[in-house]
Amino acid sequence: MFIEVTGLKKGYTTGEVRTEVLKGVDLQLEKGEIGVILGPSGSGKSTLVNIIGGVDRSDGGSVMVDGTTVTSLKDVELTEYRRENIGFVFQFYNLVPNLTVGENIEVCANISTAPLDVDQVLASVGLLDKKDRFPRELSGGEQQRVSIARAIVKNPKLLLCDEPTGAVDFETSRSILALLQRINTDFGTTILMITHNTAISGMANTVFRLRSGAVVERVRNKETLPAE
Ligand code: ADP
Ligand code: ADP
């Protein structure tokens, strides 16, 4: 199993109030698959994905990714795990505004062990001609494609997407999803994606429905399974 989340727990204390956000989450995803996490706002989707990606810590339970027990790593090991294995795509792109498109991607290519070519990766998202533009000069959909290029330039084993189509219109969201699907097919990148959009669930191998900090439903899409 490529991702194996077992009994994952996480809570926050704000003032006197303790909130249990994840109350024992179990989730599994095979290598090369696409997993989609559905669930209402506040159900713990981002928290779960952040712990899998090594940007947040759990309080209990375990996360294994490709044989690494992420939840046991020391801080410096966690940073290394994240840099070498994980690409992130966020709802609002998180591009650096005063760097060009090309520079936004280079920043990530430089810290990686096996960088793809910046031009190659921009061409693969159809934006090589925008390399010297600034993010503000691009449409929302284009900025998201840049952020996807930035996420894949280091050829991550796992691409984590937190509402990647949450800020773009319907047509644009279709092209973003098609791009993610192509990355999955071409590079064999495992993708775990949070969404509110139930229409997206068709492209997933497995759909996980989160409610109040637990997986309450798990649907395996047989028709999207690769041929044996
Ligand atoms: P979702 O992604 O499903 O909307 P989140 O994982 O973002 O859910 O958040 C789940 C709950 O945890 C929310 O109630 C949120 O307010 C709370 N939460 C998330 N991060 C923090 C934090 N750093 N401190 C306190 N509460 C947090
Ligand atoms: P999408 O259709 O991809 O969601 P939009 O066309 O709605 O994106 O544009 C998203 C944002 O980018 C808007 O704030 C828009 O004003 C801005 N924008 C789009 N194209 C340009 C451009 N060529 N120069 C500057 N800003 C732009």
Image (cartoon, rainbow, N blue to C red):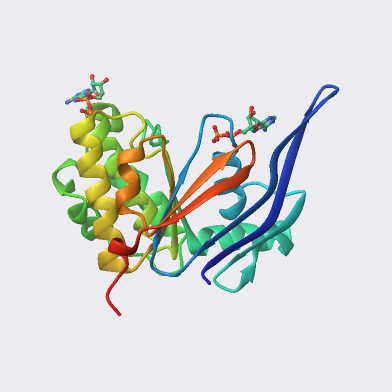
**Which residue reaches farthest bottom?**
228
Locate the C terminus by quadrant. Answer: bottom left
Q: For ligand 2, which image quadrant applies?
A: top left
Residue 153, above or below 49: below
**Which residue reaches farthest right?**
16
**Which residue reaches farthest top?**
15
Q: Which of the two residues, 83 or 162, is positioned nearer the viewer here?
A: 162
Residue 68, above or below 170: below
**Which residue reaches farthest left?**
129
Residue 109 sits in which quadrant? bottom left
Give me the residue at 50% from left, 37% from top: 39
Q: Which of the two residues, 219 or 69, is positioned nearer the viewer here?
A: 219
- Position of residue 223 measured from the top left corner of the image (x, y, whole percent): 28, 62
Q: Which of the two residues, 25 or 164, is positioned nearer the viewer here?
A: 25
Give me the residue at 18% from left, 41% from top: 130
- Position of residue 24 measured from the top left corner of the image (x, y, whole percent): 70, 50
Q: Is 64 left or right of 169, judged from the image as shown?
A: right
Residue 194, above or below 224: above
Q: Is 173 left or right of 153, judged from the image as shown?
A: left
Q: Which of the two residues, 10 or 220, is positioned nearer the viewer here?
A: 220
- Position of residue 134 measured from the top left corner of the image (x, y, whole percent): 27, 33
- Position of residue 165 measured from the top left corner of the image (x, y, whole percent): 33, 36
Number of labelled discs? 0
Residue 5 sits in which quadrant? bottom right
Give me the residue at 29% from left, 62% from top: 224
Residue 14 sits in which quadrant? top right
